[in-house]
Amino acid sequence: MAKGNKPGACRFCGQNVFVEDSAEMTAPQLEEAATMLCTCDEAIKYQQEKNRRTVAKQRINELFGEEAGEYKQPEAVREIMLHTIDAICDKKMKAATVTIKTGLRCRVMQMAKDKIKVVREISDNNEFVQ
């Protein structure tokens, strides 16, 4: 594999940035990499948004994925939660609560300054009904 450095243009300001190991990259991949390396205001805003989305999805996987022990959920349930993150990051919704089973919920919400909060809620209510 060739390790070349090709220039890519930031999608916001058009500034050329040399991207390391870009010999095999397509034009859209070069543009994305250049945008992620650029320091213009719009690129920085884009980088922060992309980072928020990535970190929130990691939290879903930490709280409900393979390493979550007894709280591990099937892939289909995690996909719903991950799509919820996308909808919140895309400003299509503000918050969502996914009730997984009695006593276990996932809450995802947009906080101040566009931060994303992911909460695993466990309620252990002992109730007797006759």
Image (cartoon, rainbow, N blue to C red):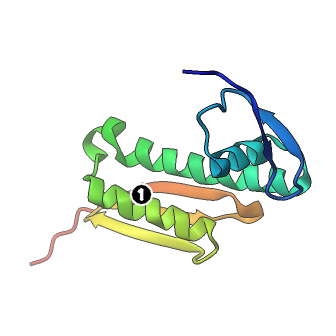
Question: Residue 19: horizontal and vertical position, in percent?
Answer: 75, 33
Q: Taking 65 as reference, is 105 above or below it?
A: below
Q: Which residue is mark 1?
A: 121
Q: Is residue 38 left or right of residue 53?
A: right
Q: Amino acid at mark 1?
A: Glu
Instruction: Specify the farthest residue to the left.
Output: 130
* Point 34% across, 40% down: residue: 68
* Point 29% across, 61% down: residue: 103
Along the line of sight, which residue is nearer the eye, 78 or 102?
A: 78
Quarter of the image with the N terminus is top right
Question: Residue 100: horizontal and vertical position, in percent?
Answer: 29, 63
Q: Is residue 18 left or right of residue 30?
A: right
Question: Residue 32: horizontal and vertical position, in percent?
Answer: 69, 49
* Point 58% across, 69% down: residue: 88
Q: Is residue 82 left or right of residue 67?
A: right
Along the line of sight, which residue is nearer the eye, 20 or 126?
A: 20
Quarter of the image with the C terminus is bottom left
| Badge 1 element | strand
Residue 123 in view: no
Residue 43 in view: yes
Q: Taking 52 as reference, is 77 above or below it?
A: below
State which quadrant residue 4 falls in: top right
State which quadrant residue 67 falls in: top left
Q: Taking 74 as reference, is 83 above or below it?
A: below
State which quadrant residue 33 falls in: top right
